[in-house]
Image (cartoon, grey):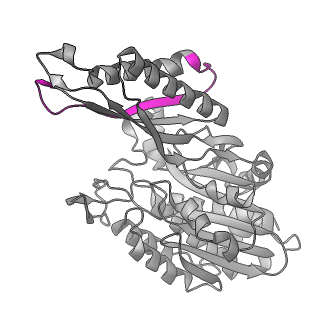
Amino acid sequence: MSIASFLNSLTPATCDLSWQEAAYQHMHRYPELSGREEKTAAFIRAQLDRFDCRVTTDVGGHGLVAVFDNGEGPVALMRADFDGLPVKEETGAEFASTERVVIDDVPTPVMHACGHDMHTTGLLGACQILDGHREAWRGTFVAVFQPSEENGAGAQAMVADGLSEMIPRPDVCFGQHIVAGPAGAVMSMPGAALATCDSIEIRLTGKSAHGSMPHNSIDPTYVAAMIVVRLQGIVGREIAPHEFAVVSVGTLQSGHSNNTIPGEGRIVLNCRSYSEKIRTKLYAAIERVVRAECAASGMTVSPTISYFAHGPLTYNSPHVFTRVREQFDGVFGPDSFTAKPWTASEDFSNLPDAFGAPYLFWTVGATPREQWEAAVAADAVETTVPVNHMSTFLPDFHPTVTACTKAAATAVLTYLGNPNL
């Protein structure tokens, strides 16, 4: 029996997944920010109690690991994340979040604006399928529920907390993410699928003076402005047109008075690429521009340049893609698409990289079909369809959860499936 035939043979009588909607709505209604996911982790732990698995909690913070043993065979790992974002929800859903947390003494709304609640719901559904139908597979299935993806720290924190000692070494790893796209479509590709990214903070030290006496200053505002202009020339003139790179200035701070030339300035960048080679070239050029502009303006104190919020490159194994894609095509038919590289970044690959394991990370469409098709017909996808991190981002539940659940199960069964089924 093929994987497609097996999954299509499941019925509510043999695999009742109706609980997924209530579980999803609960997580959506009560989101928690990165590093604060204590209640969400407890909720996931309670869901795992229905399965025959070994569960380890509090891994790398609030992470959980569930190991399903089923005899000799390969080891496959599937990961889902479960943290929310500091976004005020405006979806109008009956189960919309009204949660608030205090950040820097400011009450801040919280929302699952990136779909991590759906990722978790889908993986829990795959756990039920595999737990309840052990005749369909052999080996070890590892379900990883990861906190703190939004700040890029969760996967590495789980690794640093001894993940490799808690589970057998996986032969393959999987992850998925919902995105704007036709709900239920599964989009996969080999190679660079998500960008590597870093944030870069640049601190400039000039010399303050009264606004009426600029000749007595070394103006960090002017230097910062020149740096911002020159940075855009790096991508336009130093990165080949067929390559991809982004340098975005997210913060530009200098001064607090209308008649005082400040002594300090601060620039924060966000940079992305699909290649470690391009990343190295890009950052070398940024540092060269910053130091040269400081020297050109006579700054006597060298700038400080620091890197943070690193997101690793997500580079899908061509071999894993080929194996899994064949099964995706069988399960999803015309709804199995070839993905395009996504400029977003993920920390998922820190997990397989820690084990030296190949992996596949795919995306699942979450936009209601009617809305998506109308937007495509009007050539208005970018202006009318809510995307991740927007206050109106809400997946079309049934087709999206079905695809997430089946895609996770399909990928795992591609490696663990019982050939004698």
- Say which quarter of the image contains residue 33: bottom left
Q: Is residue 151 above or below residue 127?
A: above
Q: Is residue 94 above or below residue 286?
A: below
Q: Does residue 328 appear left or right of residue 363 in this picture? A: right
- Determine if the magenta segment contains residue 72: no
In the rendered image, the quadrant that contains the C terminus is: bottom right
In the depicted view, which residue is nearer to us: 385 or 334? 385
- Say which quarter of the image contains residue 265: top left
Q: Does residue 336 appear left or right of residue 81 in this picture? A: right
Q: Is residue 367 above or below residue 200?
A: below
In the depicted view, which residue is nearer to us: 206 or 174? 206
Question: Exactly how many numbered labels are in the figure?
Answer: 0
User: In the image, what residue occupies the spot 26% across and 21% down?
Assistant: 219
The answer to whether residue 246 shows anywhere in this view is yes
Rendered location of residue 167, percent (x, y): 70, 74
Q: Is residue 219 above or below residue 139?
A: above
Rendered location of residue 211, percent (x, y): 13, 20
The answer to whether residue 182 shows anywhere in this view is no
Q: Does residue 80 appear left or right of residue 225 in this picture? A: right
Rendered location of residue 307, percent (x, y): 48, 42
Read off the magenta span: 238-260
User: In the image, what residue occupies the spot 61% across and 37% down?
Assistant: 340
User: In the image, what residue occupies the spot 75% across and 60% down?
Assistant: 172
- Determine if the magenta segment contains residue 242: yes
